[in-house]
Image: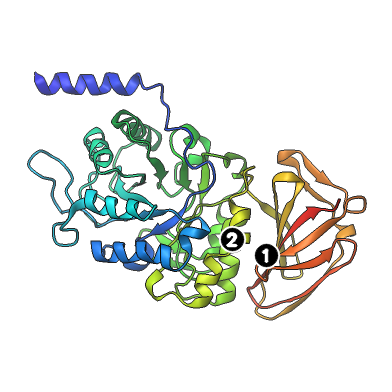
Amino acid sequence: MIKNTLLALLFLISITSNAQKFEGLAETPPLGWNSWNTFGTDINEKLVMEIADKFEELGFKDAGYEYIVLDDGWMAKERDANGNLVADPVKFPSGMKALADYIHSKGLKFGLYNCAGYTTCAGYPGSRGYEYQDARSYASWDVDYLKYDWCNTPKLNAEGAYMTMRDALKTAGRPIVFSICEWGDNKPWEWAEDVGHLWRVTGDIINCWDCEVGHGSWSSSGVWKIINMRKNIRKAAGPGHWNDLDMMEVGNGMTDAEDRTHFAMWSMLASPLIMGNDLRTASKETIKTLTNKEVIAVNQDKLGIQGFRFSNENNIEIWIKPLDNDAWALTFVNMSDKPIQLDYDWEKHNIGDDLNGKYVDMKKTKFTIRDLFNHKDLGDTSKHLQSVIESHDVLMVKLDKKN
């Protein structure tokens, strides 16, 4: 009887919560780090504390990164006698609350992973049937961010399952960024704006330019395959609700040029910038790319408009993104295996974004040009833009109206 009464109460709470996520969170795409791409389930509290230390030491915090998120494998293989999630006692002997306290002491925020299924993708306890109990645990540990996966979910409805966890988080009372990770299979861009703050639009990324790697019943995709995978979803992105192209592979084995392009494109597409490399061993060039404040500013622009492909000609793709104060970001990507000489006549290419009602006559309006990776001014749009772009590299510029 007590159990049935409790279930009825929880159901009543869920349907009277006005189906609202926590507002005022993730007004710009979240910036942070996630353990999965490099470490999988081989994680522990010493590693996480060292990553938090590197946020300060290497300038990531100063550049705007704030979330440190533990992915799959942080919990014990079984719940405790009361059905509560518990941290793996070997990997995390101090527990999640102590780890959260350490991360918060650095002025950073703490995130955890779980899954809508009976078990997580790696076989640890999932949240199916425990949503409200788990949400209370996260709140008691001062968690700030939840990544919620979609493995082992037979006969579950995705929208309904994510609504349940959203309502559980709201009932627990602690504002938590809710990251939906169902890989775009159920078109979350059509329903998730009121459910989560970001949603994955593809399956897992892998550290290559344009490959696909099979894993039996599923596959991982390289940077450019992910970029090309979804069409006509940019209208779903905006402050507090983002299309998530997955954690970044910058520093994980691609060339420095490909890393720059990867970082530029995630910024242009208003995707969360979640690092997936080992910050403790990152090269100077990787750190330089990831902490580039001028590129990050494009990602964090307050309009929250997702950029789009403007043209694709002669092995150069041009992407544009409207910015605040009538500015624009443009990214020229060399898709070929050889260097390309760019000679771009601004007056022949008017800029427009029909979705957001923005248009510029480039013959009548002049802009100054700022090279965002090389941190230098390149004159203005009264003259051709000329540059040599190396293979798979990028020229990323910001245009500001001339007075």
**Nearest the camera: 306 or 108?**
108
Going 52% across and 65% down the picture, which residue do you hit? 290
Going 65% across and 77% down the picture, which residue do you hit? 391
Query: For the image shown, how many numbered marks are present on the structure?
Result: 2
Q: Is residue 249 left or right of residue 99?
A: right
Quarter of image, res 353: top right
Instruction: Indicate the position of residue 89 as horizontal and vertical percent values.
Output: 13, 57
Res 121 label? none
**Nearest the camera: 351 or 55?**
55
Instruction: Name the kind of residue labelled 2 in the image.
Output: Lys
Estimate how packed mark 2 is, as few (under 14), some (14 to 19) or many (20 or more) residues with alpha carbons within 10 Å: some
Q: Is residue 323 left or right of residue 198?
A: right
In primary-sequence order, the first of circles 2 and 1 is 2
Res 293 label? 2
Instruction: Name the kind of residue labelled 1 in the image.
Output: Leu
Quarter of image, res 256: bottom right
Residue highlighted by disc 1: 372
Going 54% across and 45% down the picture, which residue do you hit? 28
- Residue 184 appears in the picture as rendered: yes
At mark 1, the secondary structure is loop
For marks 2 and 1, give the CA distance.
9 Å
Q: Is residue 356 left or right of residue 134?
A: right
- Residue 278 appears in the picture as rendered: no
Quarter of image, res 167: top left
Instruction: Indicate the position of residue 155 as horizontal and vertical percent values.
Output: 30, 38
